[in-house]
Amino acid sequence: MSIKLIRYSPWLVHFNTGACNGCDIEVLAALTPHYDPERFGIRLAPSIRHGDILIVTGAITKKAAARLKRLYDQMPSPKFVVAVGACAYDGGVFKDSYALRKGAKDVVPVDVYIPGCPPRPEAILHGIVKLLQKIEKLDEVKSR
């Protein structure tokens, strides 16, 4: 699949690593008609094999890291990752725990970070739109 198609109709896959669910609630709120993500072409994918953008929420435990890597590997290329919240960035309030990795970037390549604990739905949509703009620039560079 080309990057151009992802730019116009990105399908999201949401993966929660098992944290407090604050970020999960905000991600799901951002996908409701109230915020209208479909104006950007954003839809929730029915399967990991249909997803273009993987949204990761929660602290990355050592057990969840293996599942996250497996899900990332099952996605078709080109694929992008968005880390939502402080826990997905570096573990958040749990960052010095023995059971955690150093964030999603320690397991998969992260393209966009959305800060907050939890971030607001507007911030999540803003981060995804920034990723779409980044994809657009990649497409322009590739087409030259």
Image (spheres, rainbow, N blue to C red):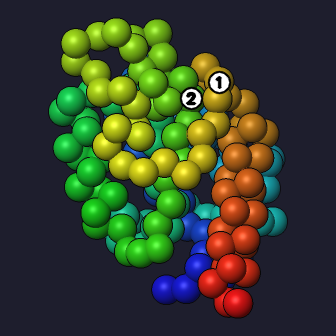
Please determine whether, in this image, residue 13 is positioned above or below residue 82: below
Q: CA distance from mark 1 to mark 2?
A: 5 Å
Question: What type is the residue that disc 1 sits on?
Answer: Gly
Q: Is residue 59 visible?
A: yes
Q: What residue sits 69% from the left and 62% below the top? A: 134
- Quarter-of-image position of residue 19: top left
Using residue 87 as the reference point, say whether residue 102 is left or right of it.
left
Q: Is residue 7 visible?
A: no
Say which residue label 2 marks: 85
Q: What residue sits 59% from the left and 79% below the top? A: 3
Please determine whether, in this image, residue 46 is positioned above or below residue 3: above
Say which residue label 1 marks: 116
Which quadrant does the C terminus fall into?
A: bottom right
Residue reaching furthest to the bottom: 144
| Residue 141: % across, % down | 68, 79
Question: What type is the residue that disc 2 sits on?
Answer: Gly
Using residue 48 as the reference point, say whether residue 35 is left or right of it.
right
Please determine whether, in this image, residue 78 is positioned above or below residue 43: below
Classify mark 2: helix, strand or loop: helix
| Residue 54: % across, % down | 47, 55
Using residue 94 as the reference point, say whether residue 52 is left or right of it.
right
In-front residue for pair 143/36: 143
* Dot 1 or dot 2, earlier in sequence: 2
Q: How many marks?
A: 2
In-front residue for pair 22/61: 61
Q: What residue sits 78% from the left and 39% below the top? A: 122
| Residue 111: % across, % down | 55, 52
- Assess whether mark 2 and mark 1 are in contact (beta carbons under 8 angstroms): yes
Label of residue 19 in the image: none
Q: What residue sits 59% from the left and 39% below the top? A: 113
Classify mark 1: helix, strand or loop: loop
